[in-house]
Amino acid sequence: MTNSKYPEIINDLIAAFKSFPGVGQRSAVRMAFAVLKWQAGKQKALGKILSELDDKIGPCPKCGNISSPEQLCNYCSDMSRNHNVICVVEEVTQISSIEASGLFKGGYHVLGGKLAPLEGKGVDDLNLATLLKRVKEDDIIEVILALGQDVEGQATAIYISDLMKNMNVKVTRLARGLPAGSDIAYADSATIAAALSGRISLD
C-alpha cells in the first residue's frame, strides 16, 4: 500500500524494501529515507551493484551455490576439502551456518527448497538431478541431509534417501539437536556442530 504523502519514487523504494524478509512498513520507510540521505555517488554505486547482479551472479554448475556465472563456487573449487562427502541443504544461506560450526570440511549441494506440494514445490523444482549425477559419477561415499526438522524437510529427506537406496553411498541426516520445525540458517554453530557429530544413518 503506497503513501500519498511521498513522491511515487519514494513509495516504490519503500515497497522494494518491504518485500525483503522480516521488513515491515516502518522499517521499510526508515530504510528508504536512509538511502535518500546518502550522497549521490553512494546511491549510484548501489544501483550499479543491483543492476549487475543478474550478469555477475549465477548458480554453481556443480552444487547450486551462488557463484560467478558458469564458474565453480568457492567450496567446489577448494581442493583442500573432502569432495567425497556432500552436505545437502535447502538454501544457500544455510551453508554459512554450517561453516560456522567449523566441523564440516566436505562439499555442499543446494536443493533450492524442499518438497512442499501445498506451495506448489515439487520434485522437478528441486536441484535433484545434479545431486544424483554427482553421487553416481564423483565417488561420493556419504550424503548428509542437513534439511529442516519440519514436516516438509523430513519428507524431502525421506524422498532423497529412497532415491539413493540402490546406490553405493551412505545417507545420513543431522541429529535431533535441532529444534523441531527450525531453519538451519538460524541455528547457532554449537547446535549445528552437535547435530553434525551425532548424525544418524537413513539406511
Image (cartoon, rainbow, N blue to C red):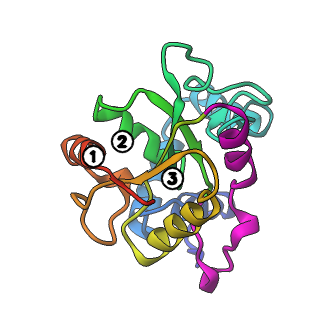
- Say whether disc 3 or disc 1 marks the residue closer to the N-terminus: 3
- Say whether disc 1 or disc 2 marks the residue closer to the N-terminus: 2
Outermost residue toward the bottom in this view? 118
Q: Is residue 152 above or below residue 34?
A: below
Query: Which numbered dot is residue 155?
Result: none
The foreground one among 49 and 164 is: 164
Give the residue at x 77% y 40%.
54
Q: In which quarter of the image is residue 69?
A: top right
Give the residue at x 37% y 33%.
99
Q: Where residue 125 appears, x then y in whole percent?
A: 72, 65
- Say whether disc 2 or disc 3 marks the residue closer to the N-terminus: 3
Q: Is residue 189 above or below residue 153?
A: above
Query: Which numbered dot is residue 97?
Result: 2
Q: Mark 1 points at which residue?
A: 192
Position of residue 69 in the picture relative to residue 155 (left or right): right
Q: Give the mark toward the camera: 3 or 1.
A: 1
Q: Helix, strand or loop at disc 1?
A: helix
